[in-house]
Image (cartoon, rainbow, N blue to C red):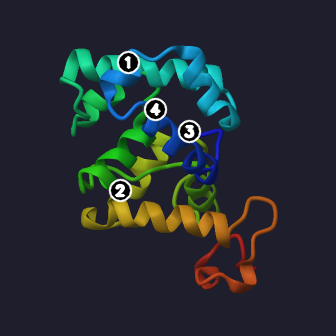
Amino acid sequence: SAQCTDKRVNLVTPSLFARYPDAASLADADQADVEEIVRTTGFFRTKAKSLIGMATALVQRHGGVVPAEMAALVELPGVGRKTANVILGNAFARNDGIVVDTHVTRLSNRLSLAAGTDAVKIERALIPLFPREHWTMLSHLLIEHGRQVCDARKPRCGSCLLADVCPSVLP
C-alpha cells in the first residue's frame, strides 16, 4: 500500500495468507476479521474492503488466478498502475513498466529526469531512458536508493553515487 511501509506489510501478510491461502477463501472472508489482521497497516477498513473485493473479482473474472496483463490487473479493486507494475515485474518477470512510488518520484525530480508528481507522466518520462529488460530491477534500485540515500528530509548527498550528475547537488 502507498500509505504503509513494506516492513509493516511483511509483518501482517503471513497471518493473512495463513488464514486466507487463496482468492476464494479471501473472497468469502468476514471483513471485520480481515480488518483485524491488517489493522496495523493503517487505513485498515479500506484495505480490508479492497482485499476482499480484489479476491472476489479474481474468483469471478479470472478463476481465482492473478492475471498477467496490466489492463486486467488495474480493473481489480485496490490495484492501480504502481501495484500492477510490481505484480507484473516480480510475479511474472515482465518488464511492462517502471514502478513509480514516492521515492521514484523524488529521485526523478531531483535528478531532473521528470517533473511533477503524476506517476504516469513520470513513468512515461523514465521509460525511454532505460532499456526495457532492466525496468523491474531499476524500480527496485530507485526505490532502495530513495529509502537509503536520497531521503526526502535529509538526503545523504555526500555518500551518493549520483552526486556528480545530480542537479540538486551541483552548484
Q: Which residue is mark 3?
A: 1
Marker disc for residue 141: none
- Please name the amino acid that badge 2 sits on: Ile
The image quadrant where one finds the C terminus is: bottom right
Question: Type of residue at label 4?
Answer: Arg
Rendering coords of residue 56 (x, y %): 34, 17
Label 2, residues with CA under 10 Å away: few <14, some 14-19, many ≥20: some
Which residue is more in the foreground, 142 or 36? 36
Are discs 2 and 4 less than 8 Å apart at CB?
Answer: no
Estimate the x, y position of residue 137 in percent, counting from the top left. 38, 66
Residue beneath disc 2: 127
For mark 1, give the secondary structure.
Answer: helix
Disc 1/disc 4 C-alpha distance (Å): 12 Å
Q: Is label 3 in a helix, a strand or a loop?
A: loop
Q: Which element is circle 2 on?
A: helix
Q: Quadrant of the N terminus?
A: top right
Q: Nearer the viewer, residue 29 or 87?
A: 29
Chain-order first, disc 2 or disc 4: 4
Disc 3 residue type (three-letter): Ser
Check disc 4 and report its element: helix, strand or loop.
helix
Q: Looking at the image, is mark 3 or mark 1 earlier in the sequence?
A: 3
